[in-house]
Image (cartoon, rainbow, N blue to C red):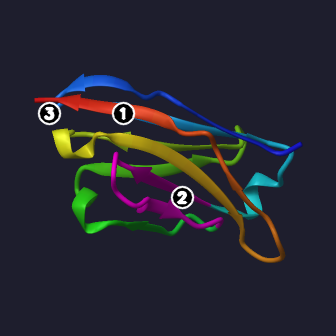
């Protein structure tokens, strides 16, 4: 079955960096738009960044200039490079794969990111 697996989360100090990875299998990765979302305790899940199958990117205002989303179609993997992390970035980060046409929408299990002050 389709797998979407996040990794790379952890504990980091304020101002630090982390790179999240989202590895997929059993999908034609190159025709999927990929997105990163996050959910903090007691809050709704929110979009962080996304990248289309063609490579166009979009960022939430609160991460612009700090986070970079990318993809490697040869490795069926999307990435989120997070710099200048803040305590308010603490959340579970989820990867989402959405087929650009047709049907297909898959979520990973999430990876915890904790930023200490």
Looking at the image, tell me whether mark 2 or mark 1 is earlier in sequence order.
2
Vertically, is 87 above or below 30?
above
Q: List the residue tagged with mark 2.
A: 35
- Say which of 44 and 24 sits in front: 44
Q: Residue at x 14, y 31 (%)?
A: 14
Around disc 3, counting alpha carbons within 10 Å, would you say few (fewer than 14), some (14 to 19), or many (20 or more)?
some
| Part of the protein shown in magenta | 34-53
Q: List the residue tagged with mark 3.
A: 15
The label number, if any, that marks residue 113 in the structure image? 1
Q: Residue at x 57, y 49 (%)?
A: 95
Q: Nearer the viewer, mark 2 or mark 1?
A: 1
Observer able to see residue 109: yes
Looking at the image, tell me whether mark 2 or mark 3 is earlier in sequence order.
3
**Quadrant of the image occupied by residue 87:** top left
Q: Position of residue 107 (x, y in %)?
A: 66, 51
Q: Position of residue 74 (x, y in %)?
A: 72, 42
Dot 3: what SS? Answer: loop
Query: CA gap, disc 1 to disc 3?
Result: 13 Å
Dot 1: what SS? Answer: strand
- Tell me if residue 52 is in the magenta stretch: yes
Quadrant containing the C terminus is top left
């Amino acid at each position: 079955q389709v797998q979407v697996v996040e990794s790379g989360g952890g504990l980091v100090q304020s101002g630090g960096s982390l790179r999240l990875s989202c590895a997929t299998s059993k999908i034609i990765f190159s025709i999927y738009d990929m997105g990163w979302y996050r959910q903090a305790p007691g809050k709704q899940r929110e979009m962080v960044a996304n990248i289309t199958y063609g490579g166009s990117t979009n960022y939430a205002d609160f991460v612009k200039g700090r986070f970079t989303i990318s993809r490697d179609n040869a490795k069926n993997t999307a990435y989120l490079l997070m710099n200048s992390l803040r305590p308010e970035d603490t959340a579970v980060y989820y990867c989402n794969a959405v087929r650009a046409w047709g049907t297909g929408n898959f979520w990973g299990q999430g990876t915890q990111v904790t930023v200490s002050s």
